[in-house]
Each structure stands twice: as C-alpha cells, then as structure tokens.
C-alpha cells in the first residue's frame, strides 16, 4: 500500500509533539546541556520535523517563534554529555518550584547551598566549557536551516 501524502506530515507532527512534551517541562536555561540520548526521537529526525514544520509546505501549524525556540534548544542536547550539566540558579529555581508544588517547606539559602555543592561535585562548569563551543556552533547551524 502506498504511503499517503499526509503520512510524513502526521509523523513529523508526532515527533514534534513528543519533543515539545519532553523538553518544555525541563525549563532549561541557555547554558544547560543534556545528553542527546535522552531525546524521544533521534536528534536528526527532530531537526527534520522542525524544519519541515517551519516551511510553508510543511503542512503543520506551529508558531514560528516556538519552532525556532525548540530548534535552538535542540543544540543543547549533545552526544556524550552523560549526567545533565545544569545551571545552579535554574536548578535552584526548579527545586523551589517542585517544593512549592508538593507543599514541602524549603529554605532557599539551604537549597542553593545544596545545588552549589552538587555543581562542584559534578563539575558542571568544567563540563559546560567542554561542550560550549559545540552548542554555539550547532545553534548557528540550526538557525541557518531556517534561512534556506
């Protein structure tokens, strides 16, 4: 049976929706880096789905700013990262939000101290420097895909 023209569109929509559902709750800061193995689909396939949705012929309707944001965020997923490289301020904020949602009482200063200790233990700053150039280059490349 031949594939219908809407099959690629529905597949792209499913990939984009899964990616959005995965990445939106993470609330990543621009300096955080995660391993691409965490992604719900292969990274290149997500790129293809997002760029197809960007084009007028893509047949999908997402806000251009949302597509661009998701594409730029995708650059923060790199091979070989392992444990996520977090931003201490963003991680402290996320933990405060989680505590509020669950009704836990947390001392912001103590929580910040705990996150700072974790940042040192996991060498977030040193590991971030190792991936920084790759993330910046990939952001530029991905933005270039939207210019074509």
Image (cartoon, rainbow, N blue to C red):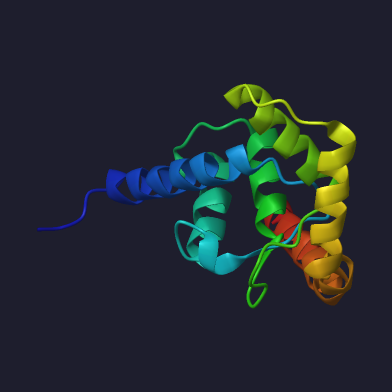
Q: Where residue 62 appears, x then y in whole percent?
A: 55, 32
Q: Is residue 54 left or right of residue 29?
A: left
Q: Is residue 64 left or right of residue 52?
A: right
In the image, what residue occupies the spot 59% across and 38% down? 25
- Res. 55 in view: no
In the image, what residue occupies the spot 45% across and 41% down? 17
Q: Where residue 119 appears, x then y in whole percent?
A: 83, 61
Depth check: give the residue in front, 4 or 91. Answer: 91
Q: Is residue 129 left or right of residue 80?
A: right
Q: Where residue 138 appears, x then y in whole percent?
A: 75, 66
In the image, what residue occupies the spot 73% across and 61% down? 33
Depth check: give the residue in front, 7 or 117. Answer: 117
Depth check: give the residue in front, 133 or 120. Answer: 120
Quick one: quadrant of the C terminus? bottom right
Compared to 8, does 130 lie above or below?
Answer: below
In the image, what residue occupies the spot 48% across and 62% down? 45
Quick one: quadrant of the N terminus? bottom left
Q: Tell me where residue 127 sits by quadrant.
A: bottom right
Depth check: give the residue in front, 67 or 124. Answer: 124
């Amino acid at each position: 049976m031949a594939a219908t023209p809407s099959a690629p569109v529905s597949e792209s929509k499913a990939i984009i929706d899964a990616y959005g559902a995965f990445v939106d709750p993470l609330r990543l800061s621009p300096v955080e880096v995660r391993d691409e193995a965490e992604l719900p689909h292969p990274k290149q396939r997500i790129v293809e789905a997002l760029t197809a949705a960007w084009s007028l012929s893509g047949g999908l309707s997402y806000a251009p700013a949302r597509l661009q944001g998701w594409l730029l965020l995708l650059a923060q997923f790199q091979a070989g990262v392992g444990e996520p490289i977090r931003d201490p301020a963003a991680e402290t904020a996320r933990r405060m939000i989680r505590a509020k949602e669950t009704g836990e009482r947390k001392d912001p200063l103590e929580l910040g101290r705990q996150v700072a200790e974790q940042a040192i233990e996991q060498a977030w700053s040193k590991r971030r420097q190792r991936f920084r150039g790759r993330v910046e280059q990939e952001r530029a490349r991905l933005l270039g895909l939207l210019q074509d």
